[in-house]
Image (tube, rainbow, N blue to C red):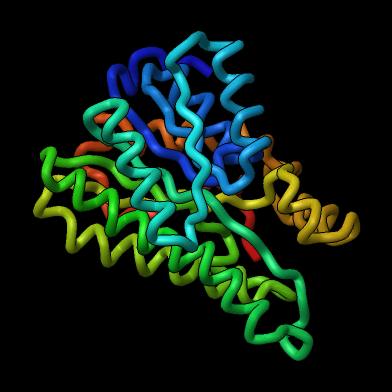
Amino acid sequence: MNYTNQLQDKTALVTGAAQGIGFSIAKAFIEAGAKVGVCDIREDATQKAVDELVKTYGEGCALGIVTDVTSEESIHNMAHTALDTWGHIDILVNNAGVSATKHIFDMTNKDFTSVLDINLIGPFMTIREVGKIMSEQGGGSIINTSSMVGTYGGKMQTAYSSSKFGINGLTKSCAKELGQYNIRVNAVAPGVVATPMMKNAVDDRMLAFLEQVTPLGHAADPDELAGAYVYLASDAASFTTGTIIHVDGGIVM
């Protein structure tokens, strides 16, 4: 993909950026001219991702920030590490996420709330923290990662589906609240994507079924999603807010 100059001189924080969709977003943003904070809870994976990005794109393109999105203190550190380094934060991508594949009868309260803590409460806290910074600097773009199951629901995915329905509501509500500060809030809802989390969430038979009901006939490579994030982060989307873009190969459940 050619994203040249679409995000020139912008800075971005991407959570869950050490692998999968998050890493693809980080690559695309750098290719578009942005500097990216690679934010992930795993220190080794974060450093490995930064090393790979620097090797490919050069020194200064990426900043590794170990971040636990369930911790207010960690989120504050993430935001202010970026602010102290760059002087501004233009883009926030809430992409960190987990799943719990269990029948509702077998799901404990802890199973359920641990997914919501990362997938929904985490984005709420990062938006609150980074949104304040953006409001003081005159605006910004916030992008949340939703999912097709945030529209259709998902069997054996009660917690994950609930968190993504919540993300859609958070996106639309924050778009209404933050528009006055020139902060745009949108979401991308992927379909079936070939990531480690997807492999852990479904077995081979379910994956084959999901690919069968996807009109484009295959699971997406994470890189195939990145263009939607670049668009929403860019000035091309200057009048786009409160929108959920489905990048799902046309799947209908």
Count of numbered marks: 0
Q: Which residue is drawn at 48% across and 11% down?
A: 59
Dividing the picture into quarters, in which one does residue 46 lie? Answer: top right
Residue at horizontal 39%, vertical 23%? 35
Q: Give me the residue at 67% from left, 77% from top.
A: 111
Q: Residue 95 location in percent, x, y?
A: 51, 49
Q: Quadrant of the C terminus?
A: bottom right
Q: Is residue 18 above or below residue 212?
A: above
Image check: 73 left or right of 175?
Answer: right
Question: Is 88 situated above or below 187?
Answer: above
Q: Quadrant of residue 45?
A: top right
Q: In this view, does 184 lie above or below 55?
A: below
Residue 138 placement (x, y as % from top left) = 11, 40
Question: In the image shown, does 216 or 111 lie closer to the viewer?
Answer: 111
The foreground one among 20 and 189 is: 20
Q: Can see residue 62?
A: yes
Looking at this view, is 30 or 136 the one in front? Answer: 136
Q: Residue furthest right?
A: 205
- Residue 82 falls in which quadrant of the image? top left
Residue at image point 59% right, 11% down: 56
Task: Please say if 165 is above or below 135.
Answer: below
| Residue 30 x %, y % | 45, 21
Q: Of residues 126 and 65, which is closer to you in this image?
A: 65
Q: Is residue 224 at least partly visible in the picture?
A: no
With 10 as the anchor, is 19 left or right in this view? right
Where is residue 62? Give x, y as percent: 47, 23
- The answer to whether 4 appears left or right of 114 in the picture is left
